[in-house]
Amino acid sequence: MSSRRKFIRNAAFVGGGSLLAPAVNNRAFAYFKNRIAPSDQLNVAAIGINGMGWSDLNALVKIPGVNLVGLCDVDKNVLDKRMGELGKMNIDSRQVKTYRDHRDLLDRKDLDAVIIGTPDHWHALIMMHACAAGKDVYVEKPVGNSIGECREMVKAQQKYNRVVQAGQWQRSQQHFADAIDFVHSGKLGNIRTVKVWCYLDWKQPLDVKPDAPVPPGVDYAQWLGPAPTRLFNPNRFHFTFRWFWDYAGGLMTDWGVHLLDYALLGMKVAIPKSIATVGGKFAKPNSADETPDTLMAMYEFEGFNIVWDHAVGIGNGNYGRDHGIAFIGNNGTLVLNRQGWEVIEEKKNADKVAVPFQKSVDVGLDKHMINFVDVIKSRKMQDLHCPIQAGADIASFAQMGNIAYRTGQKLYWDADKMAFTDAAIQEKYFMKEYHNGYKLPSV
């Protein structure tokens, strides 16, 4: 076995697994489901179904033998909407029960696995509750909202021996694996810098809005959960919660965990020596957003750097792409994103190398869900494409950048103690503070 394959196996990143053709429609899947033995059926549910949780569920229920039995959301309007859409998925809504509180759903003895698609500040609690209840879990990224949460989530998976897949579906796409193979081949020569960027012109800074009454049908106290109690504000609710520190970490943890993940995989590293950032709310200083609309973070490693660069409201990113990862080597630069990859030659180097654009050819989310189901059935945890440890590593890496920004300091990480060298920063930022009587379960 090549060193590349050994590394990928150790990192739980495998490009294989059975692939169901995306062209096969839900009706065809329903036909096959009816012919799956009862012992091979999986009963699943989704918790948080307004955004990616619903996309995840649509990919999961296409797989033969997977049965939807429950939907959970704190917003009755969302629940009613999704229940009304089940017919389009050839799912009998009479077989699906709705829930407001995830703990009631997890009490079901006939439930095998859940998707967690809630806002980030709920991920750790629900994942740990689900593992304790004996359920396998697909948890959206970032898996945790603090480094400490990530660490406890890994402990819970290990204690309860549950299948936990992080929602970083790019790890199931073939062209990403092919690009990393090329990086590991050494053909790029010495790589001194890895640039990772995300420029989103479709996302604009938020206008300030006044607090407002809680919308009818919304259990706002349940939505807040462990976050600080605040009056309801529409900016802090569906989707745009991402731009507030109470619930998430802005673009760094939204897109960063996807893209920085590949910088780490390509360079075979996980923990930086130091982290420093510059940035702020430059596009619209008086916007409602708390997270920065412009940010550059430099992660120092031995012999090279990883640089993160994001901008809200601008679409002109590096190499003419609005997002990507660039491995800049002496012989060429490999540029990778969701559309594909290429290698741009270093023209004045005698050992220059070039590769024409290699287009993406598969559907990563579908393959990621198939991998999840395959491992639920096999119980071979090493076959997961993105196990909780991998999800925790990259979520923690992104959190380091945010912490450097929020403190305005260059941070140093003690790899032996697995902590920041600054005790005050470690105390304040390592673990998210929980409110309203919530606390992480003891593991």
Image (cartoon, grey):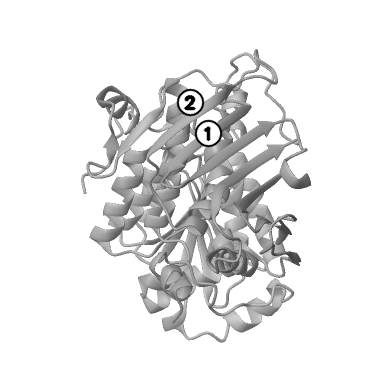
x%, y% of residue 147?
36, 40
Q: Which mark is residue 405?
A: 2
- Identified at 72% across, 42% down, the residue is 318
- For marks 1 and 2, the one nearer the N-term is 1
Q: Tell me the residue that label 1 is attached to.
A: 297
Residue type at the position of mark 1: Ala
Q: Residue at x 75, y 36 (%)?
A: 202
Q: Amino acid at mark 2?
A: Tyr
Quarter of the rendering occupied by the N terminus: bottom left
Depth check, mark 1 against mark 2: the one in front is 1
Residue at (43% x, 53% y) in the render: 391
Are there few (<14), some (14-19), or many (20+) residues within 10 Å of tag 2?
many
Are the two marked residues, 1 and 2, in contact with CB atoms closer than 8 angstroms?
A: yes
- Whether 232 is drawn above or below 389: the answer is above
Helix, strand or loop status at disc 2: helix
User: Would you place residue 410 above or below residue 134 in this image?
Assistant: above
**Near-viewer residue (215 or 123):** 123
Report how far apart the C-alphas of labels 1 and 2 lie in the structure: 8 Å
Is disc 1 surrounded by few (<14), some (14 to 19) or many (20+) residues within 10 Å?
A: many
Position of 51 with respect to 160 (left or right) is right
Q: Residue 222, can we see it? A: no
Asked whether 331 or 84 is in front, the reply is 331
Query: Which quadrant of the structure image shows residue 216?
Result: top right
